[in-house]
Image (tube, rainbow, N blue to C red):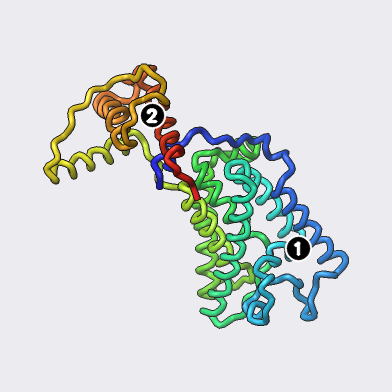
Amino acid sequence: MALHDRDYMRGRQSFRWKDLLLPDAVTALILLNVAVFVLQHFFRVAIDETGRPWGAFSLAALLDGRVWTLFTHLFVHQGLVHVLGNCVFIFIAGKAVQALLGAKHFLYIYFLSGVVGAASQAVYGLGVGQAQTVIGATAAAYGTFLALASMLPQESVSAMLHFVLPARLRFWTVAVFAMGVSSVLALLQVTKILPSDISHFAHLGGALAGWWFVRLLGYGGPPVTYERMWHERQRTEEARAFAGVPRRKRTARVAEEPAATLPPVSTREFIAQEIDPLLDKIAEHGLDSLSGEERELLDRAREEIMRRDQSGGASRK
């Protein structure tokens, strides 16, 4: 992963909560869910010969050649609470993910989470010898929220819900709690202590798929502070010393020319020249010891690294 892909070298996220009001792929998915629900429950046109929803996923349906059920089950719901809960979840988390990554990546996360969730529930069914039928977009909603929590772990849920919640809960805290509850319920389901027709393994599989996808994009790594950057550089220096490479003497300086006109050194040398001396100063005297110019240099160094990676043909997949 390129250096600018790491969380501590990223610029500020561009998501704004007012983006929730813009029409887009998220809105289209919600409208499609509602339309299918109306057809399914009010006109009874989405029911197959067995009385189950026509687009429901099961291993039997897959083996029968109905591959499309891997996707259609995401738009079929059990009841009003089921569809409304998923739509609200998708609206809030999906809008945020789309604002951060774009509609294409949001749709990747949504459908990947749904497919992986369905497959996870099918594997569970094989393990316990019980046929499993999966309906609903909950796995996709879980995956979308885990993706959001990985990108904005410190964002407050109470701020998102306009202080409806009595406490300020961070996205990552909520995500871990939800995963923990789902894991416990899945375990109780396996041990038959609390039998249920809820697809807990689908929820877990979808959540992991969403988390995995944004990890591939470079998000969701452990937070890297200046202190951690310092320790990483110390390990590099120890490795250089072990290899017999003499330690270079550095002095902090502030570049006077624009970042775009800095000497054409490699990115690694640029980091050593511009950032490492400031890390030394932070480690010895704290972050508050940096002057305004030195803080600005850290920001310019990040922008310069991103510029060099982009001009060198770096791309994110």
Q: Position of residue 80 (x, y in %)?
A: 77, 59
The relative height of residue 270 versus residue 77 in the rendered view (above or below) is above
Q: Secondary structure at mark 2?
A: helix
How far apart, in angstroms, are the residues tagged by discs 1 and 2? 54 Å
Between 208 and 274, the one nearer to me in the picture? 274
Residue at 64% x, 39% y: name it. 161
In the image, taking residue 36 as reference, residue 227 lies left or right, namely: left
Q: Secondary structure at mark 1?
A: loop
N-term mark: 1 or 2 = 1
Image-quadrant location for residue 143: bottom right
Q: From the image, tell me which residue sits under label 1.
A: 79
Identity, as a three-letter code, of the amino acid under mark 2: Ala
Q: From the image, tell me which residue sits under label 2.
A: 301
In the image, taking residue 117 as reference, residue 300 lies left or right, namely: left
Q: Position of residue 65 (x, y in %)?
A: 67, 79
Residue at 20% x, 39% y: name it. 237
Residue at 62% x, 80% y: name it. 131
In the image, taking residue 23 as reference, residue 109 lies left or right, namely: left
